[in-house]
Structure formats: C-alpha cells, structure tokens
Image: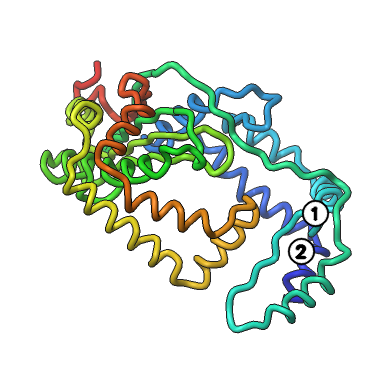
C-alpha cells in the first residue's frame, strides 16, 4: 500500500518513458482506419455525440487526437498532477482479510494531508436527440463487414422503468438465445456474432440501444432487414411470458455470481461510494426485477425504444458484393 501511494503521490516522470507512451498513443492514430468495425464505430459514435469542440463531451477526430498528443509535454503532465491530484475527493476501499481500523489508520497516515485545492465535479453526459441516419462505408478487399445500429433515448438508472429496460435488454440481444442472436445467428445463419444491448447511465440521462453484427458483405441487406424487422416485431408484439421468467432467473443469478469475487466487490463498493448510492439500491432493483409483469416490461420497451429513431452505419466491401448500391 505504501509503494502504491508513493507512486501515486510522487511519480518520477522520466522523459524516455513519457516519449515512449506518446509514441504508443500516436502510432495507431497515424495509420488510416481500414477495418469495417473501426470505421463504422467511429462514424456512429461521433454522430451520437453531437457536442461542439468547446464542450468536455466532444468526441475528437483521430486527427484532432493526434495533434493534441503531439503537443503534450512532460512538464504539462507534471503541472496537471500537481494541480489536480489529491485524496480529498478520492475513495479508498479494501476487500480481504484485513482489519477496518488498520486500514483506516493507514489511509489517514498515507493520504490524510494529500489534498487538491481544485474543485471537483462529476462529468455526466446529457441526452441529446439526433435524427436517425442510414449510411454505408466502402472498405475494398475486406472479407468481413460490420453492421452497427444505435439509438439515444432519455433515461437514467433512477427512472422507474429502468428494471424493465434491464430485462428488455437481456431478452432482446444479450445471450445467444436472445431475439437478435437467435434470429440472425441461430435460425438464419447470417452471422457468427450478433447482439444488442440497452444501457442507461447511473449519472446523466443519455441511454442507448446498440446492436452489432459481423457478416459477409453479400448478406448485408438480409442482416439489416432481420435486425430491424426483429426490433419492430418486439415493439409491436412484445416479449413472451416464458422468456421473461427465464430472463429474470438468469439475470438475478448473474448478479449473485458477479458479487462473488473480491475484485467485483471492490468495484461495487467504489462505484456506490462515488455515486453516494446505498447497497439497499441493489436490493430494491432485484426486488423490482422479481415482481415485474410482462405488461410492464412490454410497455416500458415501447415507451422508450423507437424503431424509427435507430441510426445505422454499415461498413464493408459492398461494391464487390453488389449490394447496397
């Protein structure tokens, strides 16, 4: 613990290590993107984050990132550390065979007087509505293609519908038996990898529906149709009672397993402390999951997910496959 705190408080900042780190960051940015998954992800990610350059939430281009990294100096890094690092806004957590009193004393001795005068405020991403797009990116001579779909909607984990959306995400696209994976991968054989997920932040209200499919360029139109058709079917017809029961069981069991290791507990403790969230929040969430009805889940899905609001970006050698022309 003393060594870790020493490294945190008094880093050496050797110039050769700083230069090596810069080179490691610069090299990937200097090479133009050619892979379908990289190109599609960059385009859709930046589109869904419509923030201006003077906003802390702005998603810079690769060229902008490279320029900023090249300008950085070791002296700037030292100044940033001196001005912003400190323990007064930090969280100290330990999991293991230790005594709480000993850990509290060690934390006070090692970190108690190490503070920053800079104010602290959490950075959260606010919801910004964007118009749906459907774009393609040609990647000549690439064997695989990538389909990405996404939609922003306004929700946080404090929303009363959040437990229903958690189960909706699981049933719609997470396991191999989900709607998206079962249809595109298992039944139609269009891809070895197809999934979707719905996430809502603990802070902020920029929730997201995302979908990812890797496929042969020649079946691109079928993949796009199947993904959107399945989304529209779930929106119209809803989930089934048997899959809701199975989803509840699997999700709750996964949460228990997720708390069974020291590393998982450590992450849980620190995240709850940062959010000022009591552990009763987890109990309440799981209780709500258990009591959700099918009507409640289907209603929440329709309330927050709009099939017409989904943006699509696909990348691949579609010209050679004579599709999407």
- Tell me the SS state at disc 2: helix
**How packed is label 1: few (under 14 Cα within 10 Å), some, or many (20 or more)?**
some
Residue 39: image quadrant is top left
Which mark, residue 8?
2
Residues under labels 2 and 1: Cα distance?
9 Å
Q: Which residue is mark 1?
A: 85
Relative to residue 25, is residue 151 drawn left or right?
left
Residue shown at 22%/32% (left/top)? 234
Instruction: Give percent across and percent down for residue 298.
Output: 27, 34
- Tell me the SS state at disc 1: loop
Question: In this rendering, is residue 148 above or below 262?
Answer: above
Q: Residue furthest left?
A: 187
**In the rendered view of the protein, which quadrant contains the N terminus?**
bottom right
> Coloured how?
rainbow
Residue 111: image quadrant is bottom right
- State whether residue 196 appears in this view: yes
Residue 26: image quadrant is top right
Instruction: Give percent across and percent down for residue 106.
Output: 78, 76
Number of numbered markers: 2
Residue shown at 30%/23% (left/top)? 307
Q: Are marks 2 and 1 in contact (CB under 8 Å)?
A: yes
């Amino acid at each position: 613990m003393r060594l870790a705190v020493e490294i945190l408080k008094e880093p050496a900042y050797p110039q050769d290590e700083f230069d090596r780190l810069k080179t490691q960051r610069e090299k990937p940015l200097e090479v133009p993107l050619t892979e379908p998954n990289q190109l599609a992800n960059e385009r859709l990610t930046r589109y869904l984050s419509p923030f201006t350059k003077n906003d802390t939430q702005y998603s810079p281009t690769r060229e902008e990132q490279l320029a900023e990294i090249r300008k950085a100096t070791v002296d700037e890094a030292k100044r940033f550390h001196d001005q912003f690092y400190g323990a007064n806004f930090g969280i100290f957590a330990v999991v293991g065979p230790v005594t709480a009193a000993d850990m509290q004393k060690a934390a006070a001795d090692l970190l108690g007087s190490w503070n920053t005068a800079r104010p602290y405020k959490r950075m959260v991403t606010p919801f910004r509505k964007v118009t749906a797009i459907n774009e393609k990116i040609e990647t000549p001579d690439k064997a695989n293609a990538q389909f990405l779909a996404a939609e922003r909607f306004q929700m946080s984990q404090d929303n009363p519908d959040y437990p229903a959306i958690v189960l909706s995400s699981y049933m719609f696209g997470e396991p191999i038996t989900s709607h998206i994976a079962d249809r595109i991968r298992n039944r139609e054989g269009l891809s070895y990898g197809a999934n979707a997920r719905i996430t809502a932040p603990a802070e902020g209200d920029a929730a997201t529906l995302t979908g990812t499919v890797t496929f042969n360029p020649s079946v691109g139109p079928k993949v796009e149709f199947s993904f959107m058709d399945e989304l529209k079917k779930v929106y119209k017809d809803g989930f089934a009672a048997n899959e809701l029961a199975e989803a509840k069981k699997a999700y709750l069991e996964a949460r228990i397993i997720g708390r069974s290791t020291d590393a998982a507990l450590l992450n849980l403790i620190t995240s709850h402390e940062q959010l000022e969230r009591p552990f009763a929040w987890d109990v309440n969430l799981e209780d709500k999951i258990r009591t959700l009805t099918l009507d409640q889940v289907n209603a929440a899905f329709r309330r927050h997910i709009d099939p017409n609001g989904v943006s699509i970006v696909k990348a691949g050698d579609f010209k050679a496959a004579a599709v999407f022309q």
